[in-house]
Amino acid sequence: MARSLIVKATAGSDAPERCAQAFTVAATAVAAGADVSLWLTGESAWFALPGRAAEFDLAHSAPLPDLLEAILAGGKVTLCTQCAARREITTDDVIPGVRIAGAAAFVEESLADGAQALVY
């Protein structure tokens, strides 16, 4: 049975090191061949919008747009429903490949056999 990794990013530019860590771990897991699901919640919700990842800068960290592109290419990215609603983000606004889903989907992924969830 293959293991899957669910990474929940709760921080954005408000906590740049924690944010970059979530994206880095998710992209590294994709590169290693894992089944990866990145959840954008809280302030990281903004990175579901085109161009927002390019505004993020953290010294000695891989560029967020590159990490996000790698995750979208080999895994899945989900924007939290409530987080999107609070920021007035709709499905028409997000980067192609990003879905919007809620807690039930997160719980389902996290409780699946062989799943490991990490929260940053």
Image (tube, grey):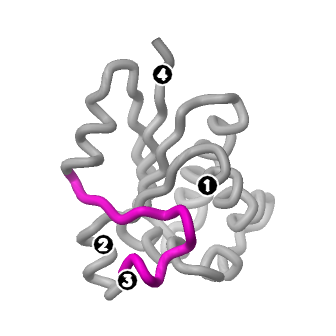
Q: Position of residue 71 (x, y in %)?
A: 62, 51
Which quarter of the picture shows residue 64?
bottom right
The extreme left residue here reads 104
> What's the CA distance linking mark 2 and mark 3?
8 Å
Residue at 42% from the left image edge and 62% from the top image edge: 99
Q: Decide: marks 3, 1 in contact (CB < 8 A)?
A: no
Q: Amino acid at mark 3?
A: Ile
| Residue at which label 1 appears | 72
Ranked by sequence position, the earlier of labels 4 and 2 is 4
Q: Amino acid at mark 2?
A: Cys
Horizontal side of residue 11 vs 59, given as left or right:
left
Per the rendering, the mark at residue 89 is 3
Ranked by sequence position, the earlier of labels 2 and 3 is 2
Horizontal side of residue 37 vs 26, given as left or right:
left
Judging depth in this view, the residue of 56 and 26 nearest the camera is 26
From the viewer's perspective, is residue 50 above or below residue 72?
below
Judging depth in this view, the residue of 70 and 24 nearest the camera is 70
Residue at 64% from the left image edge and 74% from the top image edge: 53
> What's the CA distance linking mark 4 and mark 3?
31 Å
| Secondary structure type for disc 3 | loop
Q: Decide: marks 2, 3 in contact (CB < 8 A)?
A: yes
Q: Position of residue 67 (x, y in %)?
A: 69, 56
> What's the CA distance linking mark 4 and mark 2?
27 Å
Ranked by sequence position, the earlier of labels 4 and 1 is 4
Per the rendering, the mark at residue 3 is 4
Ranked by sequence position, the earlier of labels 4 and 3 is 4
Q: Which residues are magenta?
A: 90-103
> What's the CA distance linking mark 3 and mark 1?
19 Å
- Asked if residue 1 lies in the magenta stretch, the reply is no
From the viewer's perspective, is residue 18 above or below residue 48?
above
Report how many numbered discs are placed on residues in the image: 4
Q: Position of residue 43 (x, y in %)?
A: 42, 73
